[in-house]
Image (cartoon, rainbow, N blue to C red):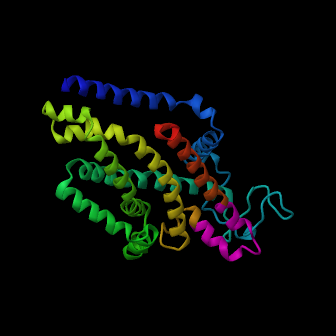
């Protein structure tokens, strides 16, 4: 009887997973204007980052001092060669925005992967093993939550110093400071899942803890992880831009939207385009990721349908 109940519960869990996958398709995406807009923006940013050398009209590092701080091409003194104008060193603003998408996309996705790996692993262990493991990890989570994430990131980046503040370092720091949300959600879901019949059946037939975590529990928490990760990309892009704006992120000559925004803030009253267009790029990308994350949450979390 227990085996039959366990098999039925396993089939129900599999049915729920198949139902979630069936809702995750392009037809449902087209029915959601918000999700479609978000997916379009995200795809455009990713394609821009991949094909930056083909899309950029000029060399983003080439100086053109005679044409420094030129307005956009449609303005009275604009130059057709520079569609969005030039910065204080005469570099093409559009080309630099296109190349800056590479850092934002790479940092956003990679940092979330690092945070997810840490958070999901700790959440699975804490929720399934409980006892001393749960107490230790829970206190560790509480300690991290006591410090604002951006403040902790700024402190770590300042301690590392400018000479080591590369893209790889920034990814590791952002990932290390953003794993808490994954750990909390996964821990709570594992607490509920481990008492269901299909997990009890797996333990009854002698499957080891590692196999249960990877084969049975991890797939059942991935929907929540995907939603958190998608929304986390937006937060990571904002954090990277804020750190670069404050001079604590990636250092020149690497191009980032935050650095461009920082360089243009001094001229905001006289040369508005220097800060406006990088700011629009950041805002549009973050908004697109948030829209896509909201759609994924509606699709992958059936509890919202109830």
| Identity of the residue drawn at 68% across and 51% down | 57
Report whether 25 appears left or right of 192: right
Residue at image coords 35%, 38%: 220
Observer able to see residue 211: yes
Residue 271 in the image: x percent, y percent? Answer: 75, 71
Identify the image quadrant of residue 241: bottom right
Question: Quick check: 32 above or below 181?
Answer: above
Q: Residue furthest left?
A: 206
| Residue shown at the point (78%, 65%) measured from the top left | 71
The x and y percentages for residue 237 are 52, 58
Toward the right, the furthest residue is: 76
Against 162, is 80 above or below?
above
User: Per the image, is 87 magenta?
Assistant: no
The image shows residue 39 at horizontal and vertical percentages of 59, 41
Q: Is residue 118 left or right of residue 256?
A: left
Figure check: 294 above or below 16: below
Does residue 59 appear in this view?
no
Question: Looking at the image, how many numbered discs can be counted on the residues?
Answer: 0
- Please tell me which residue lies in front, 33 or 92: 33
Q: Quick one: which residue is furthest to the front in this view? A: 1
Instruction: Find residue 181 and report its image quarter.
Output: bottom left
199 and 216: which one is in front? 199
Q: Dividing the image into 4 quarters, which one contains the N terminus?
A: top left
Q: Would residue 196 appear left or right of 281 to someone viewing this image? A: left
- Between 128 and 6, the one lying in front of the other is 6
For the record, the magenta segment spans 259-279
- The x, y position of residue 19, in whole percent, is 45, 28
Viewer-proximal residue among 122 and 133:
133
Classified by dominant secondary structure, the portion drawn in magenta counts as helix
């Amino acid at each position: 009887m227990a085996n039959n109940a366990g098999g039925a519960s396993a089939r129900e869990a599999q049915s729920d997973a198949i139902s979630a996958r069936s809702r995750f398709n392009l037809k449902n995406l087209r029915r959601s204007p918000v999700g479609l807009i978000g997916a379009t923006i995200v795809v455009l940013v990713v394609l821009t980052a991949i094909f930056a050398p083909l899309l950029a009209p000029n060399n983003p590092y080439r100086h053109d001092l005679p044409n420094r701080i030129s307005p956009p091409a449609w303005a009275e003194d604009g130059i057709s060669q520079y569609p969005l104008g030039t910065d204080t060193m005469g570099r093409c603003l559009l080309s630099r925005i296109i190349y800056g998408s590479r850092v934002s996309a790479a940092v956003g996705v990679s940092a979330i992967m690092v945070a997810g790996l840490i958070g999901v692993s700790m959440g699975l262990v804490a929720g399934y093993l409980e006892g001393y493991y749960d107490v230790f990890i829970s206190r560790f989570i509480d300690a991290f939550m006591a410090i604002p994430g951006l403040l902790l990131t700024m402190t770590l980046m300042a301690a590392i110093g400018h000479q080591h503040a590369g893209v790889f370092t920034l990814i590791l720091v952002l990932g290390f400071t953003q794993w808490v949300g994954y750990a909390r959600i996964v821990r709570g879901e594992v607490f509920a899942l481990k008492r269901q019949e299909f997990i009890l059946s797996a333990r009854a037939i002698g499957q080891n803890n590692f196999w249960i975590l990877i084969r049975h529990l991890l797939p059942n928490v991935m929907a929540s992880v995907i939603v958190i990760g998608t929304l986390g990309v937006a937060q990571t892009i904002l954090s990277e831009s804020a750190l670069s704006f404050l001079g604590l992120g990636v250092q020149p000559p690497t191009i980032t939207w935050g650095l461009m925004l920082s360089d243009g803030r001094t001229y905001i009253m006289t040369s508005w385009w220097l800060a406006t267009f990088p700011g629009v790029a950041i805002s549009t990308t973050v908004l697109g990721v948030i829209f896509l994350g909201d759609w994924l949450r509606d699709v992958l979390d059936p509890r919202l349908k109830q």
